[in-house]
Amino acid sequence: QVQVVESGGGLVQAGESLRLSCAASGRIFSIIRMAWYRQPPGKQRELVALITNGGSTDYADSVKGRFTISRGNVKNTVFLQMNSLKPEDTAVYFCVPEIVQRELERATDYWGQGTQVTVSS
């Protein structure tokens, strides 16, 4: 059993910032990577950013230079710092850790419930 909880969403104006937080808990042997996805209204989910257990990061072109993903000091936590927000960043944001629950098992993605980010113009 794994729980993934996101927080930090809200309503902001264009140009402002938000910081999303995510914590994974439960039966976790290791986490391969942690990612943030988003789903804008009426659109498909898309990968926003990810960070591997080695610290490598990757970003969608649309957020490069504005968003930063980082791991927290508390184990199994990750943050998404979002600066210079735009109306097109409006979406539900999901934290998705890729987790190995037991040694030698395959990794599985676990999805949180999501947190709403709304950016007004």
Image (tube, helix red, strand yellow):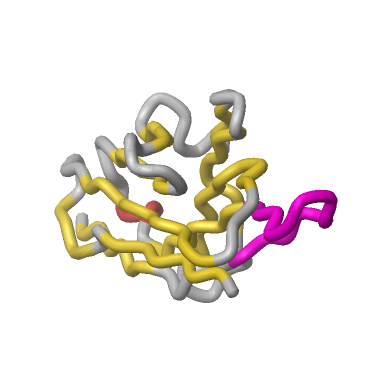
At 35% from the left and 31% from the top, the residue drawn is: 66
Above or below, 67 relative to 116: above
Above or below, 103 relative to 74: below
Q: Main secondary structure of the magenta part?
A: loop
At 56% from the left and 67% from the top, the residue drawn is: 111
Q: How many callouts does the rendering have?
A: 0
Report x, y in % for residue 74.
Answer: 34, 42
Residue 108 inside the magenta-drawn segment: yes
Above or below, 54 relative to 36: above
Magenta residues (range): 98-110
Viewer-side residue, 31 vs 43: 31
Image quarter of residue 56 = top right
Residue 83 inside the magenta-drawn segment: no
Report x, y in % for residue 38.
Answer: 50, 59
Viewer-side residue, 18 vs 14: 18
Report x, y in % for residue 119.
Answer: 25, 58
Question: Which quarter of the rendering shows the C terminus?
Answer: bottom left
Viewer-side residue, 116 vs 80: 80
At 49% from the left and 70% from the top, the residue drawn is: 3
Question: Which quarter of the rendering shows the N terminus?
Answer: bottom right
At 26% from the left and 36% from the top, the residue drawn is: 83
Q: Is residue 115 left or right of residue 3?
A: left
Above or below, 10 relative to 56: below
Report x, y in % for residue 47.
Answer: 60, 49
Viewer-side residue, 86 vs 49: 49
Image quarter of residue 46 = bottom right
